[in-house]
């Protein structure tokens, strides 16, 4: 050879012939890219988890706030709370002019609050009751009101001030402050009082039959003379020793308060039960 | 011609009164000319027909007590009823309106608050001529007339009068005292209800200044008649209730040598060679009466306050009902007495003046007054708490401002449904120097205020009856002890513990009826801008 030159075109490379015709990606095999993707995906469900967590936290916070509110309401009603008593007695020395909570109970002279007697008798907290007669009450009812108020217990050095205002043709109202919505109707007032005094007025909140019976009491208050017997029979459907169950409960108190307003206890009301209630509430 | 106008404008600025006098002179001239013109135009037609009612009507001779007609028995308009159907009665009343139409004339006669319809119709048997009907139609409004008439049952009730089931059919009609023809205001307009339900009702009202300038006419409206009868009732009930409780009425001097409440709000009068003051309140003299062993006293008299307040509830002169009482152990004995007096007064008004209250209600529609028995007593810290709940913060030692008081009144109304309540234990810092401090808490005092419809009507307290403490408190308040030396001296002679308070009669009536301005309850009100009528 005269001149040796580099080969320009190389044809000596081995050409690999493919063995398979169409090449598809293995669905199971993970390439590196996919691995990175997975790692991101692992954090994905985490985001949802954190969302759930935050929502749960918020709900828990709301529950706590509600719990606090119920606590303040119950402390407003002055539940048996020894520490609260001690605190308030310390405070009262310095601020003897600050008076305790005022609760106003507006009543019609035809709807006297017999249930008050049981609370005043058994409550640990001293309650000071004052009674006022509104200008709308006609003079005929004054004697009836006076007879009731004279028997009410009242105490000095009170923690709660209870004012009874007798107003003509008024539905019973319990007002805790000038700005809050009042609680209307004797049955609803009793529901509230049973929250404030759970030991004195037992109220099983989980039992819907109790609520049903209370609603029957509410209807009985407003029903006409003709229907009274029918409604009373519905009320006493579960009657054994007490209206519902074998213990005194809020239903008995509501029914007793209502039936006592009627001039004569009718025959379809059990005299035994009525006398038992009368003894408790006098 | 012009002289009748002058006396009313004498008091006041000289320059202003000259102008006003000129104006009044001009209007009087105008009215005279109008009246003359009317009279002259009426003359020609009457001469044609003979008048057979002569002697049954006309202008009565001026009543100079010459002794005629003393046997005549008059019936009050309010007593006219169906029971008197067919009887002939004599009535003296005012002619409120008259409407003549040809052969008939309808007129409305008014006596205090009662009105009745009068019918004068041409009738030969009863000797009523056309001229008589015309004469009746021409009687000026508000003239006082004597009428002899028969009481007749009406076919349909007369809606526009208070006496609806009967009317008067005239036999004789005489004018006792004529009013001038052009009146500065019409009683109908002044008596129209403030807010009317009917959309087509006339909207003409008379504004307050016009009413007060022509008070004589304005006071004739049924509502005003009722208001001042209620005011008289309040005064009478106050006297009766306290007298029954053993109080003695006293009268204290109004010309005094030194300001009692302290401050510059006194009127000065020239008193011979020096000057004196008009009493701001009978406070000092009430207390001296207690020290003089009168135990329980009250006084009803004028009170003068030189405050330049042009508000709806301030006057420079008003009637004060004050009371002072000695007690044994606790000032609440006095507080309960005052509260009980108010409750009895409200009850008395509600029972005895129901029709007057209804009459006022027809012109000024207002809700009836509500109160509790026994009266509601709150303490100042409780009130602060209630205001705090509503978003208004009041400092521990601050007084309540007027908007605060109004808001508190609404809150009390919402919670206790009462328009009257007592607020006890005010902070000491905002009370006068003679207020007794609270023994349990030096920041507060044994003082109280009473409110009606959210506005204060009474301010009272237990007074300091110890001269040394009194002198010390006066010094602390910066009151010159030399000026009140006589006052302090009266306590060196032995004085029982006592407390009391005072109310303004006009304000109580205004708030009881729920009116919006105190000038409505003062017959001839005095304020910084008004000294007449």
Image (cartoon, helix red, strand yellow):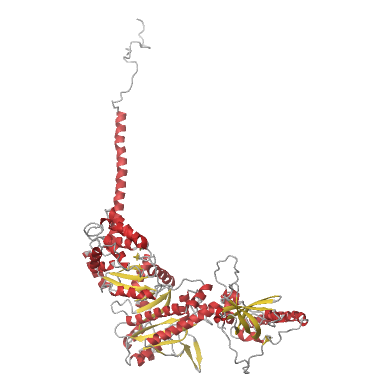
Image coordinates of residue A100 in percent, x first then y, are: 29, 69
Quarter-of-image position of residue B533: bottom right
Image quadrant holding the N terminus of chain A, namely top left
Q: Nearer the viewer, residue B351 or B57?
A: B57
Is residue B296 among what the camera can see? Answer: yes
Q: Is residue B409 left or right of residue A213?
A: right
Left/right of residue B354 with respect to residue B2 in the rendered view: left
Quadrant in which the C terminus of chain A is drawn: bottom left
Relative to B187, B31 lies left or right: right
Up/down of B512 relative to A72, above or below: below
Residue B121: percent from left, percent from top: 68, 78
Across and down, in percent, residue B393 comes to 38, 67
Q: Which residue of the protein is positioned furthest toward the top in this rendering? A: A1
Residue B1 % position (x, y):
69, 86
Confirm whether residue A123 shows in the render.
no
User: Of A219 and B276, which appears nearest the observer?
Assistant: A219
Can you tell which quarter of the image residue A205 is in? bottom left
Q: Give the total of numbered labels.
A: 0
Q: Is residue B437 above or below residue A200?
A: below
Task: Identify the residue at horizontal 33%, vertical 58% (top origin).
Answer: A230
- At x 64%, y 84%, the residue is B5
Residue A250, compared with residue B450, is above or below; it is above
């Amino acid at each position: 050879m005269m001149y040796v030159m580099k080969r320009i075109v190389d044809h000596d490379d081995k050409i690999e012939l493919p063995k398979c015709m169409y090449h598809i990606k293995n669905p199971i095999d993970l390439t590196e890219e996919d691995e990175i993707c997975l790692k991101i995906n692992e954090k994905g469900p985490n985001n949802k988890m954190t969302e759930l967590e935050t929502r749960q936290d918020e709900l828990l916070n709301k529950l706590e706030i509600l719990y606090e509110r119920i606590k303040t309401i119950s402390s407003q009603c002055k539940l048996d709370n020894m520490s609260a008593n001690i605190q308030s007695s310390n405070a009262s020395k310095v601020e003897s002019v600050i008076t305790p909570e005022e609760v106003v109970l507006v009543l019609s002279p035809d709807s006297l609050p017999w249930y008050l007697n049981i609370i005043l008798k058994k409550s640990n907290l001293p309650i000071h009751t004052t009674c006022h007669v509104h200008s709308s009450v006609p003079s005929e009812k004054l004697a009836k009101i006076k007879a009731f108020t004279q028997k009410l217990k009242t105490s000095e050095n009170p923690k709660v001030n209870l004012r009874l205002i007798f107003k003509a043709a008024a539905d019973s109202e319990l007002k805790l402050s000038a700005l809050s919505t009042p609680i209307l109707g004797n049955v609803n007032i009793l529901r509230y009082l049973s929250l404030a005094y759970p030991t004195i007025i037992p109220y099983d909140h989980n039992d819907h039959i109790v609520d049903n019976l209370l609603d029957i009491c509410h209807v009985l208050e407003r029903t006409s003379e003709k229907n009274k017997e029918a409604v009373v029979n519905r009320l006493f459907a579960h009657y054994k020793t007490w209206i519902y169950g074998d213990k005194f409960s809020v239903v008995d108190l509501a029914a007793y308060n209502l039936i006592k307003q009627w001039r004569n206890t009718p025959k379809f009301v059990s005299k035994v039960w009525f006398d038992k209630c009368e003894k408790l509430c006098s | 011609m012009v002289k009748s106008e002058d006396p009313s404008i004498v008091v006041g600025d000289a320059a202003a009164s000259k102008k006003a006098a000129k104006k009044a002179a001009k209007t009087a001239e105008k009215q005279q000319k109008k009246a003359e013109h009317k009279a002259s135009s009426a003359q020609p037609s009457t001469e044609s027909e003979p008048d057979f009612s002569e002697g049954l009507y006309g202008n009565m001779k001026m009543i100079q007590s010459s002794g005629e007609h003393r046997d005549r028995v008059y019936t009050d308009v309010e007593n006219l009823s169906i029971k008197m159907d067919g009887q002939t009665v004599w009535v003296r009343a005012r002619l409120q309106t008259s409407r003549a139409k040809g052969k008939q004339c309808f007129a409305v006669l008014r006596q205090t608050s009662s009105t009745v319809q009068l019918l004068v119709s041409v009738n030969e048997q009863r000797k009523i001529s056309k001229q008589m009907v015309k004469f009746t139609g021409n009687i000026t409004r508000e003239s006082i007339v004597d009428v002899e008439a028969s009481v007749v049952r009406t076919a349909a009730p007369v809606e526009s009068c208070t006496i609806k089931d009967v009317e008067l059919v005239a036999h004789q009609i005489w004018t006792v005292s004529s009013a001038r023809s052009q009146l500065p205001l019409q009683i109908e307009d002044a008596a129209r209800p403030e807010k009317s339900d009917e959309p087509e009702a006339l909207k003409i009202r008379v504004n307050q200044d016009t009413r007060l300038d022509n008070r004589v006419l304005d006071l004739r409206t049924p509502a005003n008649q009722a208001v001042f009868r209620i005011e008289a009732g309040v005064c009478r009930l106050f006297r009766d209730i306290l007298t029954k409780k053993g109080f003695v009425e006293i009268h204290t001097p109004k010309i005094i040598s030194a300001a009692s409440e302290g401050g510059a709000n006194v009127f000065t009068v020239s008193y011979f060679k020096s000057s004196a003051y008009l009493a701001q309140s009978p406070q000092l003299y009430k207390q001296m009466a207690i020290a003089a062993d009168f135990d329980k006293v009250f006084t009803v008299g004028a009170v003068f306050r030189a405050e330049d307040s042009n508000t709806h509830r301030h006057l420079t002169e008003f009637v004060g009902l004050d009371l002072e009482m000695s007690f044994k152990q606790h000032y609440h004995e006095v507080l309960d007495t005052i509260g009980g007096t108010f409750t009895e007064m409200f009850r008395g008004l509600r029972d005895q003046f129901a029709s007057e209250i209804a009459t006022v209600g027809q012109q000024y529609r207002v809700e009836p007054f509500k109160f509790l028995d026994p009266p509601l007593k709150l303490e100042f810290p409780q009130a602060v708490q209630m205001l705090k709940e509503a978003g208004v913060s009041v400092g521990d030692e601050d007084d309540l401002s007027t908007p605060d008081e109004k808001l508190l009144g609404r809150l009390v109304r919402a919670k206790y449904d009462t328009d009257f309540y007592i607020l006890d234990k005010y902070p000491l810092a905002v009370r006068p120097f003679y207020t007794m401090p609270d023994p349990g808490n030096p920041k507060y005092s044994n003082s109280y205020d009473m409110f009606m419809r959210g506005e204060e009507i009474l301010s009272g307290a237990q007074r300091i009856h110890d001269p040394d403490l009194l002198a010390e408190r006066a010094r602390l308040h910066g009151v010159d002890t030399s000026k009140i030396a006589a006052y302090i001296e009266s306590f060196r002679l032995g004085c029982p513990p006592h407390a009391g308070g005072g109310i303004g009669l006009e304000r109580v009536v205004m708030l009881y009826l729920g009116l919006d301005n105190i000038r409505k309850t003062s017959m001839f009100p005095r304020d910084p801008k008004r000294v007449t009528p």
